[in-house]
Amino acid sequence: MLAILRILILLTTCILICILGSIYCALYKPCNSCHAYKFGKIFSYFSYIFGIQLIIRYPKNINFPKNCIYIANHQNNFDMITVSRAIRKNTITIGKKSLIWVPFFGILYWISGNLLINRKNKTSSLRELNKIKSILKDKKTSIWIFPEGTRSHGRGLLPFKPGAFYIALQAQVPIIPICVSNTSKIKINQYNNGPVIVEMLPPINIKKYRKNQVKQLSQDCYNIVRDKLKLVNEELLKYNYFK
């Protein structure tokens, strides 16, 4: 019964947000990065519907860059609720072009300023990578990417694909990792799904890497995210939700 109630509330609220949000974006600065941040924050409050307690942590005494690449581990659809609470202003995401056909959500995703790319077409993908590089260089806009490229669904941190790290080196912008504790045990029919830690780490200075060291940068970032995930998941073991 609880699962059905949550699904009904989620669908009704989501459709309403998507319709009204699309109209708002169309009338006021369509495809502007300021919208992606706003609606990301709105969707993050769905955590209350699912009984999730978000614990957001930022690095102390850090001056955040005006433009950077955020990388986060990609577990499941709850990422839209968890990671989006931590993301800062003027940040957009990158999604596959087929998202545009998702009823209601696809239009909002596009018109709120996020980027849609064709991952299957190599020529198109390269062109889109250069477009992203230009956005990072010329605007005060940040990009949020899941470097695993697909959802892990409880399999642990998957290998990183090179795209995000190639862009960072070409655009010469820092990388900021975001680590989200295990959400694979969240159940929609469970009243209290407990705490989820979303921890943003200090920026990784890519100046010490040459532009051809994409693999090295990717592996170093992978190790940082893997090690932090181990720590935050161990921290949550003291809660009954993860026993």
Image (tube, rainbow, N blue to C red):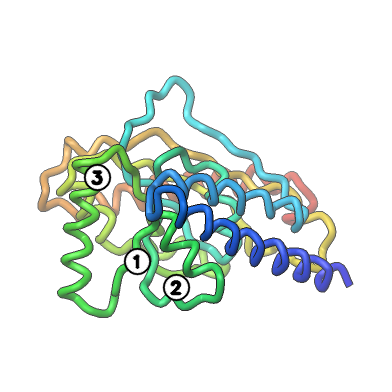
Mark 3: few, some, or many residues within 10 Å (few <14, many ≥20)? many
| Front-lying residue, 201 or 3 | 3
Is 172 left or right of 142, judged from the image as shown?
Answer: left
Label 2 SS = helix
Which sits earlier in the primary sequence, circle 3 or circle 1? 1
**Which residue is drawn at the image coordinates 37% and 60% (left, top)?**
94
Q: In which quarter of the image is the N terminus?
A: bottom right
**According to the image, label 1 marks what residue?**
116
Q: Is label 1 in contact with label 2 (beta carbons under 8 Å)? A: yes
Residue 83 coordinates in the image, percent (x, y): 53, 50
The three-letter amino acid code for the residue at tag 1 is Leu
Which numbered circle lies on residue 99? Answer: 2
Residue 217 coordinates in the image, percent (x, y): 24, 49
**According to the image, label 3 marks what residue?**
136
Is 1 left or right of 16, judged from the image as shown?
Answer: right
* Total marks placed: 3
Choose top left, top right, bottom left or bottom right for residue 164: bottom left
The three-letter amino acid code for the residue at tag 2 is Leu
Q: Is label 3 in contact with label 1 (beta carbons under 8 Å)? A: no
The three-letter amino acid code for the residue at tag 3 is Leu
| Front-lying residue, 226 or 25 | 25
Whole-number angstrom distance, CA of label 3 to CA of label 1: 16 Å
Residue 40 coordinates in the image, percent (x, y): 53, 50
Whole-number angstrom distance, CA of label 1 to CA of label 2: 8 Å
Which numbered circle lies on residue 137? Answer: none
Which sits earlier in the primary sequence, circle 1 or circle 2? 2
Q: Is label 2 in contact with label 3 (beta carbons under 8 Å)? A: no
The answer, for residue 173, to whether it is visible in the render is: yes
**Which residue is drawn at the image coordinates 57% and 46% (left, top)?**
41
Label 3 SS = helix
**Which residue is drawn at the image coordinates 80% and 51% (left, top)?**
240
